[in-house]
Amino acid sequence: MAKLTINEDACKGCSLCTRVCPKHILELNREKLNAKGYHPIHCINMDECIGCASCARMCPDVVFTVER
């Protein structure tokens, strides 16, 4: 099982990670604003994460940490 950690305060809500996630478990949290005033990304089903790190490679703000 993979562990995905997201630094929500560094996220600018660009959604690039949502397009590359093979499990489609990342989405913008429309109910929350981060310190920068953006809707941050969040994982809707952590149990489905396979630890591929596609999100981490795509993210221009390096908000993801993936551990396997």
Image: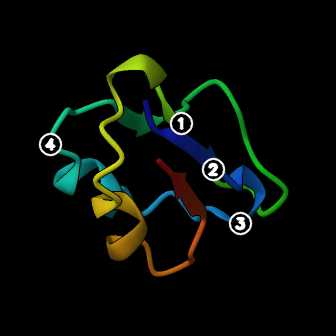
Separation of marks 4 and 3 at Cα, in angstroms: 23 Å
Residue 59 position within the rendered picture, expressed as x and y whole percent measured from the top left: 42, 72
The percent coordinates of residue 61 (x first, y second) are 56, 77
Lower position in the chain sequence, tag 1 or tag 3? 3
> What mark, if any, has residue 22 been given in the picture?
4
Q: Which residue is mark 2?
A: 6
Q: CA distance from mark 2 to mark 3?
A: 9 Å
Residue lying farthest to the right in this orientation: 35
Check disc 2 and report its element: helix, strand or loop. strand
- 30, 45: nearer the viewer: 45
Q: Position of residue 43 (x, y in %)?
A: 48, 31
The residue under the point 28% across, 48% down is 18
Lower sequence index among marks 1 and 2: 2
Residue with the mark numbered 1: 42
Task: Tell me where residue 37 sits by quadrant.
Answer: bottom right
Give the CA distance from mark 1 to mark 3.
Answer: 12 Å
- Say whether marks 4 and 3 touch (CB < 8 Å): no
| Mark before the other along the chain sequence, 4 or 2 | 2
The answer to the question of whether label 1 and label 3 lie on touching residues, with beta carbons closer than 8 A, is: no
Q: Which residue is mark 3?
A: 10
